[in-house]
Amino acid sequence: MSLIVQKYGGSSVATPELIKNVARRVIKGYEAGNQMIVVVSAMGDTTDHLIDLMGKITDDPDPREVDMLLTTGEQVSIALLTMAIHACGYPAISLTGSQIEIKTDEKHNQAMITDIDTTRLKKELAENKIVIVAGFQGVNKNHDFTTLGRGGSDTTTVAVAAAIEADRCEIYSDVDGVYTADPRIVTDASKLDYISYHEMLELANLGANVLHPRAVELANSYNLELYIASSFNDTLGTIVRGDEEMEGKKNVVGAASDLGEIKITVERVPDEPGIAGKLFNALAAEGVNVDMIIQNLQRDELNDITFTINQEQEKKAVKVLEKINPELNIDNYHIDRDVAKISIVGAGMQSTPGIAARMFSAFGKNNINIAMITTSEIKISCLIAKEQADQALNILHKEFRLNQINN
Amino acid sequence: MSLIVQKYGGSSVATPELIKNVARRVIKGYEAGNQMIVVVSAMGDTTDHLIDLMGKITDDPDPREVDMLLTTGEQVSIALLTMAIHACGYPAISLTGSQIEIKTDEKHNQAMITDIDTTRLKKELAENKIVIVAGFQGVNKNHDFTTLGRGGSDTTTVAVAAAIEADRCEIYSDVDGVYTADPRIVTDASKLDYISYHEMLELANLGANVLHPRAVELANSYNLELYIASSFNDTLGTIVRGDEEMEGKKNVVGAASDLGEIKITVERVPDEPGIAGKLFNALAAEGVNVDMIIQNLQRDELNDITFTINQEQEKKAVKVLEKINPELNIDNYHIDRDVAKISIVGAGMQSTPGIAARMFSAFGKNNINIAMITTSEIKISCLIAKEQADQALNILHKEFRLNQINN
C-alpha cells in the first residue's frame, strides 16, 4: 500500500463530466490498494468569473477580501469531486486549507506555506477515506484565508506530499508531460521520460506551463519525486527527480523561447564606478526585476548598459529612468520590444565543453543575430529578434537532437 | 452610539449594483455613529447555480459535502460587499461562520446554532470596522461547515444580535414589511406598523415569506425587537416585538391562505380505542407531519378520519396507508388535492368572544363551505375549496377591517 498525493488542475475539473472523469481516475488508485490524497484547483473559468464580479465592484480590492472571494473556487470543486466519488460508491471527504490547517504567513494573494498540520489528513486516511484537498489556499494565524498566488495548487500538492511523507506525488493537467520544446512550435518535440529538478526549474521559469517553479523548488528541497501527466489520457508522463549521477546527465534536455521580455538600452552613461549599481538599485527599489545585463564601453569613457525586463514592468522601469536621469547623466535610452529569449537547458552542460559554441554557430549559420547572452551552470540563453524565435527554437532542437532524447 | 445588526437577503445583493446599494445603506448607518454588523445571504441565484452543478454530479449528495458547496455562496457575497464598502472609503471586514465561530450541532443542511463566540466580532468592532457576516452557515465541533437550512440567514441574524446584545436588529429584503394579507391577492392589504412575535410566528408558518419562524422564535426567546423592511426603498417597515399589554391587543392582525396542503379521508375505520393512535403513529414514524385532524362517527360503529398534510408528503402518506391497511381494516381512503387553508391571526382573539363565529358566518353568507376547522389561542384556520381561496381571503380581510389596521 502506497500513500499517493495527486493534483488535478483547473482544466481537468472544468465541467461536471470532467469531475466524474477525475473521480474514476482517483478511484482506480484507491482500488489498487493505495491511500489517496487529491488536491484540486478551481473549476476551469470559476476564478475568472469571480474576478469579473470583483471588477464590477472595485478596481482596488483589499487583498484579504480577494482571498476570501477566490478561496470559494476550490471549495466548490472539492465538494463536487467528493460527491462524484461518493456517487461511485467510495468513501471520500473534502477539506479546505483552513480545515486541514495549511498554515501560511500573512501575505494575502501570495502567501508562503509555513507549516501543514497532518492530523486531520491522517485521521481521514485512517478511516479509509479518499481525502480531497483544496489547492491554492491556506490560513494565517488570525484564521484569515490566504491564497498562494500563481502555481498555488502545485505548491499545495508538493507541500502536502512532503508533510505527510507520501510515496508518490502526481501532477495531472491537460499537458502530457514535459517536452523538449513547445510542441506547438517544434513539431517533433519529444516528451521526456525524466528531468531533473534543476532542469525543470529552468524550463518552468522559461514559461513551460507544466509545473510552477515554486513547486519544483519545494520538491527539490524534500527530494520528492514528481510525476507529470495528463488527466485526459493514460499516456506515460514525465518524472521530475534529483540529478542523476554525473555520467548519466544529458547535455541538453530542452529548449524554450520566452517572448515576454523587452530590452532597454541606456546609452552613453559615464564610465564611473557605481553608476551601474545606482541604476539597478533604483530599478530594484521599484520592484523591477532585471534578467539579462550587458555593459560595453563604447567611446569617450561612456558606457552603454543594456538589460532586459518583463514587458509588464515597462512603465515602472521608464518611471525609474526618468527619475534618475539627471543624476546619472544618461544621454538617451531606447526600448526594443521585438526580442525573444531562446534558451537551452541541461544538467550535463557544465561538464561538457562546447555546448555554447554549438548554439552560437548554429544561430550564425542561419543568420540569427545574438544581441545578448547569459549563462548559468545548466542553461544558456540568447536574446534574438522576436520574428526569428520559432525558427531558432527548431534549429536548436535539431542541433541537439532533442527529438531522440529518450534513446 | 447603537450597535445595529442588519440582514440583507439574496435578492438585495443579487447583482454588483445591488451590492453597492447595500454598501451605501450600511455606510449611512455607520456615518450616523452606529456600530454595524451586517449579515448577508448568497447573491440571488448563486445557490440555484450550485445546486444545478451538484445535480449534474449526483442525485444523492452527502449532506456534509452539500454544506461544503453551499457555504461558498455567502462567502462570495461577504467578500464583495466588504470590497464595495472599502471602495466608498470605509473600513470593513468579512467573516465566515467558521471564522466567527457560529457553533452548531452536527446536523448538516439543517443545523441548529448552539453558541456564538463574539470575541472576533467585538475585536473588529473595537477597530471601528463594519463587520460583514456570512448568513446561513456555521461550524460544528469537527470544524466541518454546516448550514442552517431554510430561513438560515434570518436565524444567523437574530442569533448574532442576541449573542452580542445588539440595540437593533433589522431584516431587509425585497418586501416592505408584514402585511395584513398577501397584497397580490388582497389589493387593499395594509402594512402593519407592529406585530407580536406570536402573531408573526403564525403568519410566518402560514407561508408569509417575510421572516422565517425559527428567527421569530429566537427573537421571542431573547425578547429582541426586529425591524422588517425593504432594501430597495426607504418606506417604513414593520416592527416585530413582544405582545402588548392585554388591552392593546388587536383581535385580528392578518389573514393568510395556504395552498400547500392536501386532505386525506380514511373511511369507515372500526370505532375501537387506539385505532387513530396507530394511524397517526405510523404516519409520524415515516416523518409525515399531520396538520388538521377531524374524526366523526358515521354509522355502524365505523369512523371517518380526515386529516391534512403537506402536498409534498403525499407519496409517503399513501405508502403508510397501504402498509397498515390490513391491520386497521380501512374500508377505503381518498385524497382531495383541491383544498386551501384560510387562517386569521391575532393575539387579542383569545379575549374576544365571537371572532370564530364572525369568520364562519362571513363564509356562510358567501356560500363558502368549511370542511375542517382548527383553532389555537391566536389563530383560527378553515379548510375550504381551493378555488374559493382568494375570495375567502378578501372576505375575511373586509370582515375584520384589516385595511384600517393601523388606525
Image (cartoon, coloured by chain):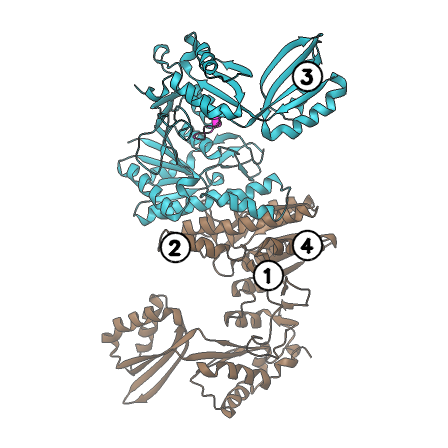
Chain colours: A cyan, B brown
Q: Residue at x 59, y 43 (%)?
A: A65
Tell me where residue A156 appears, x and y as whole percent: 46, 33
Q: What chain letter is assigned to the residue under label 1?
A: B
Question: Between marks 4 and 2, how big is the CA–CA gap?
Answer: 37 Å
- Residue at which label 2 appears: B55
Tell me where residue A291 appears, x and y as whole percent: 57, 20
Q: Amino acid at mark 4?
A: Arg
Q: Quadrant of the C terminus of chain A?
A: top left
Q: Is residue B177 above or below residue B251?
A: above
Q: Residue at x 54, y 67 (%)?
A: B209
- Residue at which label 4 appears: B24
Tell me where residue B316 appears, x and y as whole percent: 33, 68
Circle 4: element type: helix
Question: Between marks 3 and 2, how big is the CA–CA gap?
Answer: 64 Å
Toward the viewer: B317 or B276? B317
Question: Between marks 1 and 4, how big is the CA–CA gap?
Answer: 30 Å
Q: Amino acid at mark 3?
A: Glu
Toward the viewer: A225 or B226? A225
Q: Amino acid at mark 1?
A: Tyr
Q: What chain letter is assigned to the residue under label 3?
A: A
* Residue A212 on the magenta segment: yes
Q: Quadrant of the N terminus of chain A?
A: top left
User: Is the Cβ of the residue at disc 3 closer than 8 Å to that at disc 2?
Assistant: no
Asked if residue B212 can be seen in this view, the reply is yes
Q: Amino acid at mark 2?
A: Gly
Q: Is residue B186 above or below residue B2?
A: below
Q: Residue at x 45, y 49 (%)?
A: B69
**Does mark 4 fall on the same chain as mark 1?**
yes
User: Is the Cβ of the residue at disc 1 closer than 8 Å to that at disc 2?
Assistant: no
Q: Residue furthest right?
A: A326
